[in-house]
Image: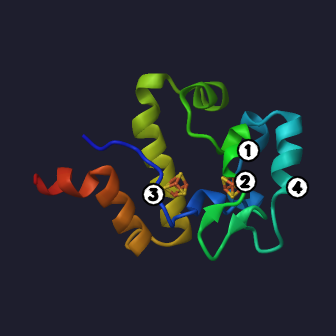
């Protein structure tokens, strides 16, 4: 079974362009929506995203909506803890496909690291 994890050197979910995130106001509080919008740079990327390292500059203090945690996903999306793994994998794959492409190096690396490649090929 594939097991979700955040794969290093990805950052696909840190491209915050609100035109590509319909329904933000349905799962963010008004204060979080303001915070979210304040983080969007001119290029659509989060201003806290370090493009050189592809890492978050404020990782320890990143907002709630950046955290893949059971409580957060239940509050924001109504996802039960037992559904979190598959939901998070689908979210990441959607973000990676949108940003880098579904045959990108980032997608290959994600699939390999969470175990999707192994499952598909039975090894
Ligand atoms: S899309 Fe997923 S793997 Fe990529 S940075 Fe975000 S949480 Fe990590
Ligand atoms: S605060 Fe960090 S984790 Fe959240 S979108 Fe920005 S760079 Fe990504």
Q: Residue 58: which numbered mark, if any? A: 2
Q: In this view, does 4 lie to the left or right of 14?
A: left
In which quadrant of the rendered view does residue 76 lie?
A: top right
Dot 2 and dot 1 residues touching (CB under 8 Å) = yes
Residue 69 occupies quadrant? top right
Mark 2 crowdedness (10 Å alpha carbons): few <14, some 14-19, many ≥20: few
Look at the image and tell me in which quarter the C terminus lies: bottom left
Q: Earlier in the sequence, mark 3 or mark 4?
A: 3
Mark 1 residue element: helix
113 or 75: which is nearer to us?
A: 113
Give the CA separation, mark 4 to mark 1: 16 Å
The x and y percentages for residue 36 are: 81, 50
The 10 Å Cα crowd at callout 1, few under 14, some 14 to 19, many 20 or more, is few
Q: In this view, does 71 lie to the left or right of 118?
A: right
Considering the numbered disc 2 on the image, is that residue within a helix, a strand or a loop?
A: loop
Taking depth in this image into account, of 32 and 23 the one nearest to the observer is 32
How far separated are the C-alphas under marks 2 and 3?
A: 17 Å
Residue depth check, mark 4 versus mark 1: number of the one nearer the observer: 1
Q: How far apart are labels 2 and 4 at the CA level? A: 15 Å
Is residue 110 visible in the rendered image? The answer is yes
Q: Mark 3 points at which residue?
A: 7
Query: Is label 1 within 8 A of ligand 2 (CB to nearest ligand atom)?
Result: no
Q: Circle 1 is placed at which residue position?
A: 61
The first of marks 2 and 4 along the sequence is 4
């Amino acid at each position: 079974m594939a097991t979700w994890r955040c794969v290093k050197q990805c950052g696909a979910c840190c491209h915050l362009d609100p035109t590509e995130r319909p329904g933000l106001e349905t799962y963010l509080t008004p204060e979080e929506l303001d915070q979210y919008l304040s983080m969007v740079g001119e290029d659509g990327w989060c201003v806290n995203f370090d493009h050189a390292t592809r890492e978050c500059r404020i990782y320890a203090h990143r907002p709630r909506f950046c955290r893949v945690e059971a409580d957060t996903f239940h509050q924001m999306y109504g996802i039960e803890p037992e559904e979190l793994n598959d939901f998070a994998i689908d979210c990441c794959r959607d973000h990676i496909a949108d940003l880098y492409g579904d045959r990108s190096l980032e997608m290959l690396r994600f699939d390999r690291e969470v175990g999707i490649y192994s499952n598909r090929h039975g090894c």
